[in-house]
Image (spheres, rainbow, N blue to C red):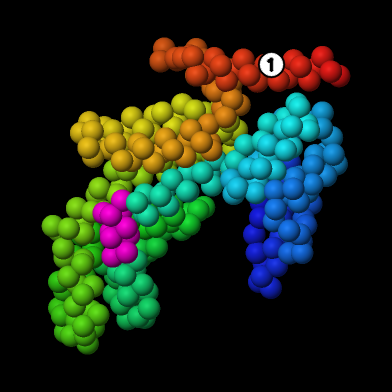
Amino acid sequence: MSDGWSDRKRRSICNFLVNSPNGTIFLSSLDTSDISKTGVKVFEMLDEVVEKVGEENVVQVVTDNASNYKLAGQMLMDKRKGLFWTPCAAHCIDLMLEDFEKEIQVHRVTIGKGKKIVAYIYSRTNLIHWMKEFTKDIELIRPAVTRFATSYLTLRRLHEQKGALFSLFTSNKWRNSRFAKSEKGKKIENIVLDNRYFWKGVSTCLKATVPLIKVLRLVDSDEHPAMGFIYEAMDRAKEEIQKNFNNVLRCYDPIWAIIDRRWETQLHHPLHAAAYFLNPQLHYSPNFQADAEIKIGLYNVLKKWSLTLMRG
């Protein structure tokens, strides 16, 4: 698994980790600041790591799904016939959440307003103290493993603390303060007390995203391997979203379209279908369904590995 990030000196660093039934361990770290981010260079970097670990020990290589990594992954599979490249599931789901914010107006507007509330309160010491009095010391900011999940989890926290926020912005403490008399304060108060648009928008956003955030938690967990559950979890998330919108097609169809676009072009791989089919916890459940797509994925994995064994 590769994980790219930037340090405080803005150097590009790539960490390499190895996962097995015994858990995940750190393998090495590389300063990639002077390495071109072309697909060819990324391929050479990944290929060297596979060589170090031993091709016979590698089933899957996981990276983010930027275009250069996608090209490098394909080149790696062309050379190393027995392994699969897949993009990081958590990254793909985060991109789905980003697409919601970019492409659906109610998400974009609601998140913007939510950020204004949080930024206004947390930039004023007195307001932070008052807010904590009303929320019983519960914070409004809800950090998550990915950037866009954080935005939606913060909306969820605002929704959970709606009553506390109402009480704060209608209290004498607020009304008698200098904040309530300022233009910014009045705007924030109007957002918080806006049941017609803002809070309705929060509810709409959460109906679409909470099921996906559950999948995100599954794939980002270190406790249990997620590969055998992703396929079924994504189907379950879509069904939950449909149910949240009372099966009204025009409400959930734009959400499904964004999910399907990312799932079908980036996240859905034969390994996911094979892992779903071979997962005994799911295979022997009453609701197990092995459609043509799942069987084809399974056959592709078996074909790839059988050819590799024959060559060996």
Please tell me which residue lies in front, 75 or 63.
75
Coordinates of residue 159 in the picture (x, y in percent): 27, 55
Residue 108 colored magenta?
yes
Q: Give the magenta-colored segment's residue range.
A: 104-113
Q: Main secondary structure of the magenta part?
A: helix
Please tell me which residue lies in front, 229 or 161.
229
Q: Is residue 33 left or right of residue 129?
A: right
Coordinates of residue 111 in the picture (x, y in percent): 32, 60
* Residue at x 75%, y 26% (from the top left corner): 82
- Looking at numbered disc 1 in the image, what kind of residue is underneath it? Lys
Coordinates of residue 176 in the picture (x, y in percent): 16, 84
Please tell me which residue lies in front, 12 or 186.
12
Asked if residue 192 shows in the view, the reply is yes
* Residue at x 74%, y 48% (from the top left corner): 40
Q: Is residue 194 left or right of residue 3?
A: left
Query: Badge 1 local density, few (<14 within 10 Å), some, or many (20+)?
Result: few
* Residue at x 17%, y 58% (from the top left corner): 197
Disc 1 element: helix
**Above or below — where is 210 with respect to 176?**
above
Residue 117 colored magenta?
no
Q: In which quarter of the image is the C terminus?
A: top right
Q: In this view, does 276 lie to the left or right of 102?
A: right
Asked if residue 173 shows in the view, the reply is no
Coordinates of residue 310 in the picture (x, y in percent): 82, 14
**Above or below — where is 171 with respect to 151?**
below
Tell me where residue 241 sits by quadrant: top left
Q: Give the total number of marks visible in the rendering.
A: 1
Q: In which quarter of the image is the N terminus?
A: top right
Q: Name the residue under label 1.
A: 303
